Image (cartoon, helix red, strand yellow):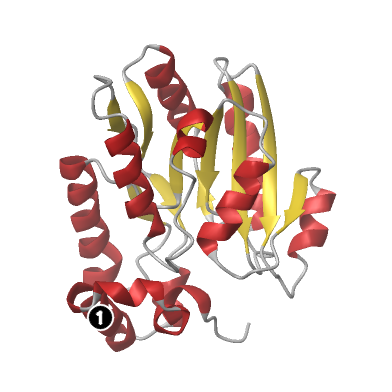
Amino acid sequence: MNCSFIIPAYNEEKFLKQTVESLRKSISGAEIISSEEIIVVDNCSTDRTAEIAKNVGVNLVKEPVRQIARARNTGARHAKGDILFFVDADTSIKVDHLTAACEGIIKGKAYGGGALIRFDDHQDKFFLGVLIPAFWNWVSKTFSMAAGSFIFCRKEDFEEIKGFPETMYAGEELEFVRKLKKLNRKSGKKFKILDCEPVITSSRKLSWYSNGQIVFYLFLLLFFPLAVRFRKLCWFWYRRPQQ
């Protein structure tokens, strides 16, 4: 398989090197992958993200508009692979995830998919750090929905549905998956949530925000889903504390 790995990155100097090294290790162990490229999309970083990307030898592109969907789409436009993998800069994936994803597409059983998730630390917050991820994993498996931390699809399908919706500042992966499913409804294939162990993603937001802030945001999305169309209302994804 000829694969492109796209990593959107905003101020990711803490995680980026580790993520790229982990990804390369997994790629090298996945014999099913014949060629690959790693693309880091610098999305207006003000730290050493771009410098680190250059130092670790990935393809670096820049997206001047601060938006997650736009950053992913910019990376995909530069991608040469037949299969696109979108991996968040704070997420670690293993060889089993890559092998299972590629095999699903090669065997004609899947047109795309994702994986279950687990935080690297629950930050002593059982409800938010353990129960909420467990609930999401149930939703993910039951309804075949993927978190944005790890999604894969065929490039031809990505281009057909015009990528991630740039009218949304959060939750764009859910709309992206919905469009993928609609496109492939009659194909007999599935959007596959991998049976492997979960990918590991950072729990940093649990330390950045209080329990009250996080619960408030969850209720905001529940009762006012149109909030995802307004950048200011998506502060949970775009505002960071001073490091």
Please, what is the three-letter code of the amino acid marked with disc 1? Answer: Leu
Is 125 drawn above or below residue 136 in the view shown? below
Determine crowd level at label 1: few under 14, some 14-19, many 20+ residues with C-alpha closer than 10 A. some
Q: Position of residue 36 (x, y in %)?
A: 67, 27
- Vertical placement of residue 59 versus 90, above or below: above
Rendering coords of residue 232 (x, y %): 45, 84
Q: Quadrant of residue 14?
A: bottom right
Q: Which residue appears at 57% of the width and 25% of the height?
A: 82
Residue 24 falls in which quadrant of the image? top right
- Tell me, yes or no, if residue 193 can be seen here: no
> For the N terminus, which image quadrant?
top right
Q: Residue furthest top?
A: 107
Image position of 236 (left or right of 81): left
Q: Is the C terminus in the top left, top right, bottom left or bottom right quadrant?
A: bottom right
Give the residue displayed 48% in from the left and 38% down from the top: 158
Please state the horizontal and vertical placement of residue 146, each as a whole percent of the image: 33, 46
Left-right relation of 120 to 48:
left
Pick whichever, 39 or 22, lies toward us.
Answer: 39
Comparing 215 with 108, the one in front is 108
**Residue shown at 41% from the left, 20% from the top:** 105
- Residue at which label 1 appears: 220
